[in-house]
Amino acid sequence: MEAPVRRRIGEIQWLRAVAALMVMVAHLQVEIALNHFGVAPNAVPTSPFPFTAGVDIFFVISGFVMAHASGGLYGRAGAWRSFLVRRLARVVPLYWLVTLVLLALMAALQTPPWLALTPWQLVSSFLFLPALDSNGLPFPIFTLGWTLNYEMLFYGVFALFVGWPRRIALNAVCAAIVALVIIGRVWPIDNVAARFWTDGVVLEFVGGILLQRAVARGLVLPGVARIGLAVAAAAMLIAFADFDFTLRWLEWGIPALLILTAATTARREGRLSAGWIAEFAGDISYGLYLTHLFAIRLMIKAIEIAGLSGPLVWYVLFPAGVLGGTIVASTLLHYGFERPVLQALRSRFDRRITAGPGEAPAP
């Protein structure tokens, strides 16, 4: 039953890369407005197309992939331990590394955020616990980590039920997440983490799970329908470019789900593996997401030192330099850090977990 999903892995890998690039473009737009046009930080205009919705695409992909990749764990004793080891080994090391690099830079430059840093901000950032920063916003030290705080909630809920039979487990995960959102609306709790984790955006994980089940059962759409979904998604994103965060799950989450549906419901026969370019693009997407802000700061500094200005600099040289630098950095990190660390951690912990009778093999 999962073969139809495996045939879509290539599309998902491409979409991961596209989502990361969308977030990068969103940040490039802000920096061009600030540095080329001299717009005040609190007056940056809303982009006609909300590229930051790449985050929402990440969330629906996460729901889709977790439902599929856990196929060897459903109904197995101790599955929750194996699931968490695999997810933490994949997500935590690189995030901790970039956070440590950022802390070192903040300390060396004695930046205002460094001077205002509290012990709780430090602890909560490394433990993926939502906490207010010095500006009163629920961001960790490395601000892009707010998305990982949502991912960790999803992993925790998924781990609670992954040892149950597949259908029951996925239904329970979806029900638990929906219940969290309802509780957050009906009985709002005056707590940063509670407000953060009961936001409607977590419903995007549910959307990804439901789509995966439909694709696993053989959902296929004709090309015209898939194009229609993509066009509808783009139209919705443009219409809700200046969105209400409390309705993000609806205004950007639905388009993200439509995009993933369009990408995963084409008729595919024969070969199951993705092409190497798609594999590569998807593999480095996490590093691309986490490192592009560093590339942006370095390019801005280089432009300042060189005394460059003008449209060609900010519309061509700046984005090209950031894109090239980020691809190089994320590639080096993936092959030189992520993969070796992932293999070492899984070899040490996952093997120990799966050694007992009835345990699931690594997917």
Image (spheres, rainbow, N blue to C red):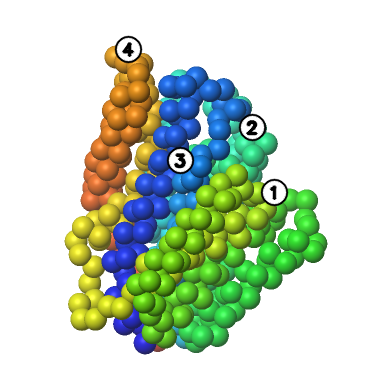
Residue lying at 51% horizontally and 42% vertically, measured from the top left: 48
Q: Which mark is residue 134?
A: 2
Which-is-in-front pick, marks 1 and 4?
A: 4
Q: Residues within 10 Å of mark 2 (few under 14, many from 20)?
A: some
Q: What residue is disc 1 on?
A: 192
| Disc 2 to disc 1, C-alpha distance | 14 Å
Dot 4 amino acid type: Gly
Nearest to N terminus: mark 1 or mark 3: 3
Dot 1 amino acid type: Val
Which-is-in-front pick, marks 2 and 4?
A: 4
Residue lying at 49% horizontally and 24% vertically, measured from the top left: 34
Q: What residue is disc 3 on?
A: 26
**Horizontal and vertical percent for residue 257?**
49, 65
**Horizontal and vertical percent for residue 67?**
45, 74
Residue lying at 24% horizontally and 44% vertically, measured from the top left: 332
Asked if residue 322 can be seen in this view, the reply is yes
Nearest to N terminus: mark 2 or mark 1: 2
Q: Secondary structure at mark 4?
A: loop
> In the displayed structure, would residue 73 be above or below residue 111?
below
Dot 3 amino acid type: Ala
